[in-house]
Image: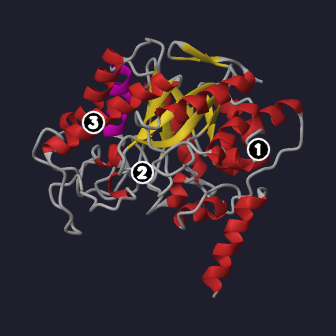
Amino acid sequence: MLIFSPCPIGRKTASNRFLSQPMEANDGDPGGKVSERTLERYKNLARGEWGIVVVESVAVTPTSAACPNGLIISQKNLDRFKRLVEEFKAINRAALLFFQITHSGLKSYSPLPVKSIWSSDVEGRESLSTDEIEDIRKAFVEGALLAEEAGADGVDVKLCHGYFGTEILRPVNTRTDQWGGSFENRTRFLRESIKEIQSNRKHSDFVLGSRISMYEGLRGGCGTARSDELIEDLSETIQLIKLMDELGMDYVNVSAGEPKFLPAITIPTKPSKEFYLDHFRYTKLAKDVAGSLKVIGSAYTILQEDAPIYAEENIRKGYTDFVGFGRQALADPLYPKKLKSGESIRYCTLCSGCGRLIEHQVHSGCVVYDPYYKGLYQRIQKKNRS
């Protein structure tokens, strides 16, 4: 099967086409350090023989994680990240391990007032200054270089799901300085960051990519043509993908929606199952314009037992290069290995329990198959009933 075949990505090669998407679990130690629980999760994914594993939303500043126990990359935390890479690679040296670096923007779980990127904010928040945005950009560059120092094979610069990287790209970003207004200004953050990372990385095969939201479903959001528009228009999204290729990036990871406001687009559920077709459409469109970029598709978890059939078809037809799984990787981190060997697989039941744990700011994982997370979920339900 093609899904088990190797595939180059940048100057490295993934052992197969399975990618474990970055799934926040809110289980770091104080200060954003990698915890023992975090280590065990990624060691299990290493045992699962995924071609690529992406470490979850690693914040680039001390106050920009989305969860109280989110991971934060810094010089102070570097040893723990090095240990994560070492223990992962000790189990599966063939798998590629990327870090997704992020700033959570308005989603930041911070004791300080969270500033907006907009020149004016309907909720009356103070907006970020020109210099503050430049400081965030420098933090992304530093975070990427620290990821390389930790031993990661590459980084995913997060431009999806309503976080800072998405906020700055939206047409509704009408700032009048160098960071807003025109498409050129709104993509300046990405352009300058990628060029600086490329100039300072120690190894030319350090992979650079990004997960993007093709269409958010928000007025003035990514995938619309103007700040006051709601209807999908992917002209700018296509420009963004072409720009990523021009910059010499290695891949684009295709997503959609904004989980806080339109979770069914980002994470199709049983009632919204057909949204996987939009993800397939977006992924094919990305592949059509991606040039030398490798393309990673999403929304395969919703298909459960049928996922390999659709994955194989999409790879064979040239609609995608890799297939990404999020919730399925939580339900059964050994999924690729079991699928290849014919073992029984714990399929995601699409209950969204893992997401509800995140909403309540506790450790997150599969509430169906893992007793620890099941217990957390039951306590939340009991509390809600009382």
Q: Are marks 3 and 2 in contact (CB under 8 Å)?
A: no
Numbered label attached to residue 137: 3
Residue under label 2: 65
**Vertical relation: 243 (above or below) 235:** above
Q: Amino acid at mark 1?
A: Asp
209 left or right of 8?
A: left
Q: How is the image coloured?
A: secondary structure
Q: Is residue 222 visible?
A: no
Quadrant occupied by the C terminus: bottom right
* Crowd tier of the residue under label 2, counting other residues whose Cα lies within 10 Å: few below 14, some 14–19, many 20 or above: many
* Crowd tier of the residue under label 3, counting other residues whose Cα lies within 10 Å: few below 14, some 14–19, many 20 or above: many
Numbered label attached to residue 306: 1
Tell me residue 227's x, y (percent).
23, 54
Magenta span: 236-246
Q: Nearer the viewer, residue 303 or 327?
A: 327
Quadrant occupied by the N terminus: top right
**Vertical relation: 341 (above or below) 15:** below
**Element type at marker 2?**
loop
